[in-house]
Image (cartoon, rainbow, N blue to C red):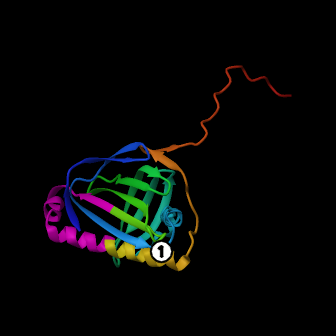
Amino acid sequence: MAREQDSRQAVTDGVTRRRPLRRQHVEETVEVAVPVRTAYNQWTQFKTFPRFSTVVHDVEQVRPTVTAWTIGYGPLRRRFAVEIVEQDPDSYLAWRGLEQRPSHQGEVEFRPTESGGTAITVRMLLEPRGATGRLTRSSKVTQVTARLVRRELLHFKQFIEGLGQEGGAWRGTIRNGRVQHDHPEPPRSRVAQWPVG
């Protein structure tokens, strides 16, 4: 469903994030019958998206925070890069497209449910430019995008519930597009290195 929203702040675990979504955006939620940790771990295995998605054909990990996605229907294909700008294990992931047009950004939240499952909410904002931008401002395009996101979430639900467990995990934290390390590197010695013989 498309929703009218202003820019807003989200506070989770003491961390304030600017939600990138404003104006008309797509927001869809699905509940999966696996724990949050399992759902999150599988979601972060981006290379497995083609196994359940009807539109994602390939995902390549370019750098720790950048992936290249190939999507499309039938013979039509489009490749673009995405940067993960925020990521908190078991709760939140936000991304932005690195392409010029159409640009997009989004976020996905993972919340535990009373039944022991996970509510997964995906929000996406497409920001096409030029003539494409004028065409996509219509509510019909937003409705089509919402249906596509909903269908892909339902495919993920079937996939993870069928597996019953994740096929891998990446548990890192990302802030402002940079991986945060649990243990900072020790300071380098200022003493000159002696040749070893």
- Where, by quadrant of the figure, is residue 70 drawn? bottom left
SS type, badge 1? loop
- Highlighted magenta segment, given as a residue range: 123-149
- Where, by quadrant of the figure, is residue 155 drawn? bottom left
The residue at the point 29 percent across, 57 percent down is 104
Is 134 inside the magenta-drawn segment? yes
Prevailing secondary structure of the magenta residues: helix
How many numbered marks, from 0 up? 1
The residue at the point 16 percent across, 56 percent down is 130
The correct choice, above or below, for 162 with respect to 44 in the image is below
The correct choice, above or below, for 127 with respect to 55 in the image is above
Placement of the N terminus among the 4 image quadrants: bottom left
Q: Is residue 168 left or right of residue 141?
A: right
Q: Position of residue 6 (x, y in %)?
A: 20, 50
**What amino acid type is highlighted by mark number 1?**
Ala
Q: Position of residue 56 (x, y in %)?
A: 41, 70
Q: Position of residue 109 (x, y in %)?
A: 39, 59
- Residue 55 at least partly seen: no
Along the line of sight, which residue is nearer the eye, 43 or 88? 88
Is 92 inside the magenta-drawn segment? no
Q: Position of residue 85 (x, y in %)?
A: 41, 48
Q: Which residue is mark 1?
A: 33
- Residue 37 at least partly seen: yes
